[in-house]
Image (spheres, grey):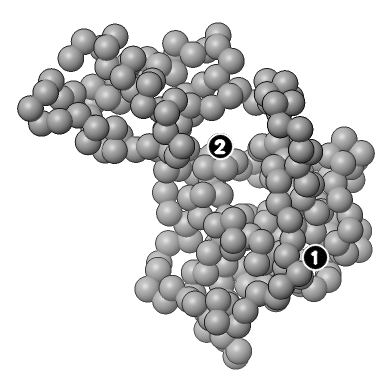
Amino acid sequence: MEIKKLKSILEAVLLAADRVLTVIQLENLFELDEERPSRDEIRKALHEMTDDYQTRGYELKQVASGYRLQVRQEYATWVGRLWEEKPARYTRALLETMALIAYRQPVTRGEIEEVRGVSVSSNIIKTLLERDWIKVLGHKDVPGKPTLYGTTKVFLDYFNLKTLDQLPTLAEIKDLDSIHPELDLDDSENTAPEDSSKSIDVVAEKVEEISAIDDTELSETDYSQEQEEAALPDEKQVFNV
């Protein structure tokens, strides 16, 4: 198949898809009795498409789960005006909790509370689980068998990451408090005192920078014990890539 035609087909498919697609999924779109491109040819076409879109308002992005076409971040302000409803802001506490899980996984709720200096709301854990940004990795082998949490591919996809290695080191991040007005975070959730939350404040800034704030609402329903105990004891990886 000619590379030009293949790129047009892949572009059409990715524009129509409502999810991230892998190279294998793209390959399976072609019937065996037609001119079926190889995986290497599909990868080559995707690579060329990435270069083709350099001057356009959208880009071909490779994330943890595969490839997708998306609006470039610098145009999000104008595209966002298509929707009248203003998205709810994430609370500072939710961002700090999410950042801690991303940087220190596998981590327990107690370990998160130890760093932040305050208790972690059940609503925050529930929200992160419902969004499929975190998952239960197992239970820590200590008295009480606390649940261990880690991030998911959905988290990586949402924040335009291929792997967690793309997150910067803490030394590369400024103090969150210095740009607090710029972030316009919702401080309705209690946060840790400055001395105990300093390390996670800088992590939270990067989580905020990776992607524009989307909509989320904290439920009033507590996270159930049955969900909390739904461990994956045979899982060995901190996260899937």
The single residue placed furthest to the bottom in the displayed view is 143
Q: Is residue 100 visible?
A: no
Which of the 4 quarters of the picture holds residue 96?
Answer: bottom right
The residue sitting at 19% across, 29% down in the picture is 30
- Image coordinates of residue 226 in percent, x first then y, are 55, 82
* Mark 2 crowdedness (10 Å alpha carbons): few <14, some 14-19, many ≥20: some
* Mark 1 crowdedness (10 Å alpha carbons): few <14, some 14-19, many ≥20: many
Side of 70 where 109 appears, left or right? right
Q: Nearer the viewer, residue 234 or 173?
A: 234
Q: Amino acid at mark 1?
A: Arg
Side of 18 where 180 appears, left or right? right
Q: Amino acid at mark 2?
A: Asn
Q: Label 2 vs label 1: CA separation?
A: 26 Å
Which of the 4 quarters of the picture holds residue 195?
Answer: bottom right
The residue sitting at 89% across, 54% down in the picture is 187
Relative height, residue 180 to residue 3 (above, below): below
The residue sitting at 18% across, 14% down in the picture is 1
The single residue placed furthest to the left in the displayed view is 33
The residue beneath circle 1 is 116
Relative height, residue 168 to residue 84 (above, below): below
- Image coordinates of residue 148 in percent, x first then y, are 56, 72
For marks 2 and 1 on the same chain, the one whose residue lies earlier in the sequence:
1
The residue sitting at 42% across, 49% down in the picture is 241
Which type of secondary structure does the marked residue at label 1 adopt?
helix
- Image coordinates of residue 207 in percent, x first then y, are 69, 45
Relative height, residue 118 to residue 4 (above, below): below
The residue beneath circle 2 is 160
Q: Nearer the viewer, residue 93 or 79?
A: 79
